[in-house]
């Protein structure tokens, strides 16, 4: 699953390519503008001024569009900015991608005044696209562009029927992952070690 684009022509110095980014040396007809994108090279960027997405580019501001479009100097134009800027973009790609596409709601039984399983399913969406169970402690549910979190430890404390909750979710969708030992979490944590909100968005990644 690709989360971003980096468009460049000169070498990306001190950068090791990562699998969640598309690396492009041109903007073709099938270029995915919906992904967060970094253009590398000020002079190179100006070659694409005919694209409406790039009409408000300012050499003093590396952000063109919040969470969406950015640019950075080539190594020959500004060595330190080039290295730091690319590293910063890659670090923030998960934030750029996920937080602009999905909303998150923690279904807290106290806050939502839930007394039993039926109350819980009354507030959950009727259609569930995917769900992800992490170490039998958290459930993350995806419905269109909304993610819902259930802290099973809290639901156990308030005597909810945990097994019945899981069974009903399994009945609602076949697109689910039971990450009993946290294997999937560990895999993506190695990719995004500084992304503090990783767990809630794993429902998108592991069931994609």
Image: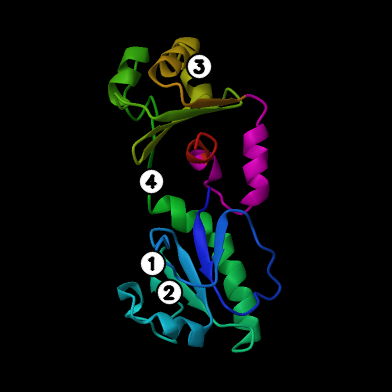
Q: Are marks 4 and 1 in contact (CB under 8 Å)?
A: no
- The residue at the point 41 percent across, 61 percent down is 30
> Nearer the observer, disc 3 or disc 4?
4
Label 3 or label 1, whichever comes before in sequence order: 1
Q: CA distance from mark 3 to mark 1?
A: 41 Å
Provide residue 78's location: percent of width, then percent of height.
61, 87
Q: CA distance from mark 2 to mark 4?
A: 21 Å
Q: Is residue 116 visible?
A: no
Q: CA distance from mark 3 to mark 4?
A: 27 Å
Q: CA distance from mark 2 to mark 3?
A: 45 Å
- The residue at the point 56 percent across, 58 percent down is 21
**Pointer 2 residue:** 63
144 or 44: nearer the viewer? 44
Q: How would you rate the neighbour count of disc 1 (Cα within 10 Å): few for under 14, some for 14-19, many for 20 or more?
A: few
Label 2 or label 4, whichever comes before in sequence order: 2
- In what element is the residue under mark 2? strand
Judge from the rendering whether residue 189 lies leftward or rightward of residue 54; answer left or right.
Answer: right
52 or 141: nearer the viewer? 52
- The residue at the point 49 percent across, 39 percent down is 200
**Pointer 4 residue:** 102
Q: CA distance from mark 1 to mark 2?
A: 6 Å
Q: Which mark is residue 66?
A: 1
Q: Are marks 1 and 2 in contact (CB under 8 Å)?
A: yes
């Amino acid at each position: 699953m690709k989360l971003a684009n980096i468009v460049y022509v000169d070498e990306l110095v001190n950068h090791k390519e990562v699998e969640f980014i598309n690396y492009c040396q041109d903007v073709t007809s099938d270029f995915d503008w919906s992904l967060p994108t970094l253009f590398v090279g000020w002079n190179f960027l100006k070659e694409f001024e005919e694209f409406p997405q790039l009409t408000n580019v300012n050499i003093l501001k590396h952000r063109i569009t919040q969470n969406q479009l950015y640019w950075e100097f080539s190594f020959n134009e500004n060595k330190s900015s080039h290295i730091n800027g690319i590293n910063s973009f890659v670090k923030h790609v998960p934030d750029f991608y996920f937080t602009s596409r999905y909303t998150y709601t923690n279904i807290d039984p106290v806050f939502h005044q839930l007394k039993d399983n039926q109350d819980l399913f009354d507030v959950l969406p009727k259609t569930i696209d995917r769900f992800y169970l992490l170490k039998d402690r958290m459930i993350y549910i995806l419905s269109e562009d909304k993610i819902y979190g259930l802290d099973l430890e809290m639901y156990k404390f308030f005597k909810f029927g945990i097994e019945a909750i899981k069974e009903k979710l399994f009945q609602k969708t076949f697109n689910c992952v039971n990450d009993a030992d946290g294997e999937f979490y560990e895999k993506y944590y190695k990719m995004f070690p500084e992304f503090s909100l990783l767990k809630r968005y794993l429902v998108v990644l592991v069931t994609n």
